Image (spheres, grey):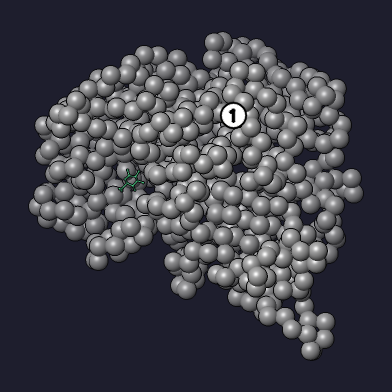
Amino acid sequence: MFPTSKIKPPGNGSLFLWMLLLWIPVINAQDSLLNNTYNRPSTSLNGIWNYIVDPYENGFYNYRLEAFEDQEDPGQNAFFTNAKPSSPSDLIEYDFDLADSLLVPGDWNTQKEKLFYYEGSLWYKTSFDHTPANLSNRTFLYFGAANYQADVYLNGQKLGKHIGGFTPFNFEITQILRPRDNFLILKVDNKRVKDGVPTLNTDWWNYGGLTRDVKLIETTATFIGDYFLYLDAANPEKINGYVQLNGPELENHPVRLQIPELSVDTTYFTNKMGRTEVAFTAENIAYWSVEDPKRYQIIFSSREDQLTDQIGFRSISTREDDILLNGEPIFLKGISIHEESPARGGRGNSMEDARQLLSWAKELGCNFVRLAHYPHNEHMVRLADEMGMLVWEENPVYWTISWDNPETYALAANQLTELIARDKNRASVIIWSMANETPASEPRTEFLSKLAALARTKDPSRLISAALEQSAYRGESNVRTIQDDFAKVVDVLSFNQYIGWYDGLPEKAQNISWVIEHNKPVLISEFGGGAKQGFHGDKNTRWTEEYQEYLYEETLKMLSSIKQLRGMSPWILVDFRSPRRMLPKIQDGWNRKGLISDEGKKKKAFFVLQQFYNSKD
Ligand code: GCU
């Protein structure tokens, strides 16, 4: 289970934070996350799985609403037992093998018409044979994500549960696995909950299910469980980090680190917790950059295990109101993206989806993407690493979260921890965003500040931000500012503004000025307006492409007056599904602020932004 031994009281952290960290195992009972699974041999469990829709959770609770798994004998009515009649007179009211099927990975909403709006519990089942390549090996079951809560059972035994719809989790199954006829059953429940992260209200489709890859990972008894390598902020020839082993032979275990191209070949020995800090200097490091996304082949070797990765080394920092990549000022020419598949709709999850979305961003002239409003699938950041695209990743602390609930904080902290654990070695990721458009209050600022402290503890090498909200400056509506205590905590001052869409018409932008009283880089994390692709008319007629085009023209002029402006990620690359957008013949369940339609057709505003970016150095 979750090795709490890895959690030590922070030297300077608050006891409250430490106590909260201990909540995490209660909420997410799984093993520590396997790092870099895409570079490990694996057995995919993707494919056709049987499913049972269970809105009354009849497969989880008895009629007294007592959980079967809490009973001495769960009994054959518990779906996770996968019971079969032992005689023709036996009463069993479910049968996975006779049930309908879904493709995994994939949300259920866009696979079955009857599940389009479904929010509730749904059971998945697959069977598989597996014999480890070596009997001393360990086997893990790895999920890229399941939205929103997953209760996982193998061969009738509870492995654990995970809460959070956008981050990976895994369970060790070494002791339960058998060579043949393993049955893997899980209940995925995508009901929105007030104390969840996100909470009840979001402007995106609540895609439920096993939305990302499912696979078996085999490891040696003691293996390289985790590692982190990053360029020292103060010394561009120094690389810091750590390697963490997982297994019985933790202490004084040799760990060899090789970077052939940098003539690095050093062996470290782990402490009794199986961890070794890493620090070394190297000359002539070719830094990862947008123009040249150089990644080095890294080889980690321990007594029994070897794992490779391709890691780029770069520094990202701020100086006054500049953002510095490798010490040089950079303007983040970005676009916001939701995780939807351009090819088939629904949750994106493949390398093909990632390639299409990031190729459109590149064509738009971007060097930066804001992956809103939750961690996207790992293909997006691995491809961004390869392409030289900078990335903002975001924890789904969105709108009106339950700031006063410690369990809600633990959920947010766990999802942020899992995101950082998964992507901390990806050079393309430069910003961890704590939240989006959260109403400023003392409990909210304390909540976000604790998350920011946690992120900085986990990863000292990246910038912290959040999409804040703007307001009138000293009551003067034509002068806007950022009045938010969390603005003091972030490295990059980001905010959303919709002047010309939710706030007047595009021409209003001509009369707005900005007062930013923070000596920090400013990034406009959202602006934009809706347009139905192919609908043309006067530039003041809402939903026409001309309106959106005019809004971009006027907004870009207005924003250019902000002297600290160092980037933007307009809302949004592609139209996306939202149950909040129901204007017939225009929205029909789609948010139409995309520069590209859901059919992949570019709107006129695409070319306004493209021209602006191409004219910027
Ligand atoms: C908000 C929010 C987005 C939303 C957008 C809109 O700023 O951050 O999630 O989709 O506005 O209203 O379209």
Confirm or reject: label 1 Cβ below 8 Å from ligand 1. no
Nearest to the observer: residue 60 or residue 507: 60
Q: Residue at x 42, y 57 (%)?
A: 205
Q: Residues within 10 Å of mark 1 (few under 14, many from 20)?
A: few
Nearest to the observer: residue 550 or residue 451: 451
Q: Which residue is mark 1?
A: 16
User: Label 1 is placed on what type of residue?
Assistant: Phe
**Among all residues in the image, which is located at the extreme right?**
135
- Which image quadrant is residue 366 in? top left
**Image: 551 above or below 341:** above
Position of the C terminus, as image quadrant, is: top left
Q: Percent x, y for residue 25?
A: 68, 42
Q: Percent x, y for residue 113?
A: 45, 72
Q: Residue at x 79, y 19 (%)?
A: 268
Nearest to the observer: residue 225 or residue 289: 225
Q: How many marks?
A: 1
Q: Is residue 423 left or right of residue 566?
A: right
- Which image quadrant is residue 421 in? top right
- Which image quadrant is residue 117 in? bottom left
Q: Residue at x 32, y 43 (%)?
A: 571
**Among all residues in the image, which is located at the extreme front?**
64
**Image: 111 above or below 559:** below
Q: Percent x, y for residue 42?
A: 72, 49
Q: Percent x, y for residue 329?
A: 38, 18
Position of the N terminus, as image quadrant, is: top right
Instruction: Give SS at disc 1.
Output: helix
Q: Residue at x 43, y 34 (%)?
A: 444
**Image: 461 above or below 29:** above
Asked whether the viewer can see residue 241, the reply is yes
